[in-house]
Image (tube, rainbow, N blue to C red):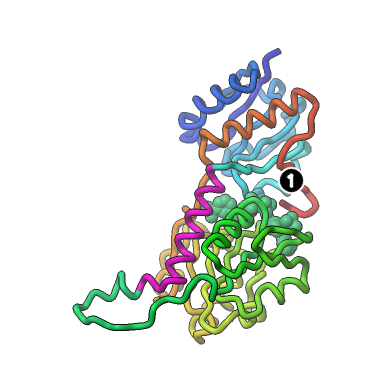
Amino acid sequence: MTVNVLFAAPEKDWEEYAPHLRTALADFGIAADVGTDIAPEATDYIVYAPNSPLQDFRPFTRCKAVLNLWAGVEQVVSNPTLSQPLARMVDEGLTNGMVEWVCGHTLRHHLGMDTHIHGQDGIWREGSVPPLASERTVCILGIGALGSACAHHLAQFGFKMRGWSRSPKRIEGVTCFHGENGLKEALTGADIVILLLPNTPDTENTLNSETLALLAQGAVVINPGRGPLIDDDALLAALNSGQIGHATLDVFRTEPLPADHPYWSHPRVTVTPHIASATRPNTAARVVAENIRRGEAGEPFLHLVNRQSGY
Ligand code: NAP
């Protein structure tokens, strides 16, 4: 039997995804009709990007699952018309990209690379040699698919790694904390904090004036998670007082970040335009195909979103 797979994402994505989805479905032995114009009542699966024009799931009466192309689901999880199971994206390519971005920005701050990149003035300054990673404490808030992969790689450099999650976790080389009380312990005295939490009502303003004050003086904040995880006014105040030495921010409450936002001109803020990582069509297509295979075989879907917790 042929399954009908609707690709519901901005038009420009279709060209990129189509060959990979067709190949992956064929590799998984699934006869499929994949396209952007499958009728709602004939659709078995929706491959979905939250910025797609499709926002009303009610006509998709026989759809077995909505397979999100993004790791973040905050724009779809509370859609009241969505009654179908929702799976988020966990993609090897997306994870590897995030590991590279996070390690790169962590090492920039750890090694103080800016001093020598921007300070080429002909003066030979015999300054201090950077400390070793083993002398630095890095805390990752959110140690799921992306956070745990980043923690694993940073631990290889020798950083003293801490991680924080909702439920208890065990990750080799990482001291793990969980729950409200664990947050304080995870942050206290940390030199670098990396945010890889989902955007849910519970995670909003996780970094605020109280929690920023727990970090080591001059600590660095790196946020590739989501903008609302940080109280922006509190971060700007902490940057101005010197409590925070630098913030590297990839995500914002409003994107694109408005041109007059104080982050753009702050001397100790680095803005990157939500490019930390992205779903890679070649690897993500295989995740989609595996979930369709599971759906057809009556097996549980991978990476299902818990509607109650919002991620
Ligand atoms: P994930 O696997 O669902 O991991 C989320 C982690 O956050 C888990 O460890 C979870 O705890 C923890 N968490 C959630 N709510 C919490 C709470 N209230 N208190 C403490 N910990 C909490 O998600 P992921 O795939 O790693 O992705 C994380 C986020 O990265 C995405 O949601 C997205 O916003 C962002 N992202 C950004 C980019 C970019 O380019 N900037 C790209 C991809 C993703 P448990 O382990 O206990 O569940």
Left or right: 100, with 69 as reference point: left
Q: Residue furthest bottom?
A: 241
Q: Is residue 200 visible?
A: no
Residue 182 x %, y %: 75, 71
Residue drawn where x is 58% and y is 73% of the image: 137
Residue 136 x %, y %: 54, 74
Q: Quadrant of residue 21?
A: top right
Is 310 located above or below residue 289 in the figure?
below
Total numbered labels: 1
| 111 and 293: which is toward the camera | 111
Residue 162 x %, y %: 65, 68
**Part of the protein shown in magenta:** 93-114
Residue drawn where x is 30% and y is 72% of the image: 118
Left or right: 76, with 98 as reference point: right
Say which amino acid is labelled 1.
Val
Q: Is mark 1 on a helix, strand or loop?
A: loop
Residue drawn where x is 64% and y is 18% of the image: 29
- Tell me the crowding category of disc 1: few under 14, some 14 to 19, or many 20 or more residues within 10 angstroms, Cα based: some
Quarter that holds the N terminus: top right
In magenta segment, residue 117: no
Respond yes or no on whether mark 1 lies under 8 Å from ligand 1: no
Q: In which quarter of the image is residue 279?
A: top right
Q: In which quarter of the image is residue 55?
A: top right
Residue bearing the label numbered 1: 305
Residue 203 x %, y %: 69, 64
Secondary structure predominantly adopted by residues drawn in magenta: helix
Q: In which quarter of the image is ligand 1?
A: bottom right
In magenta segment, residue 104: yes
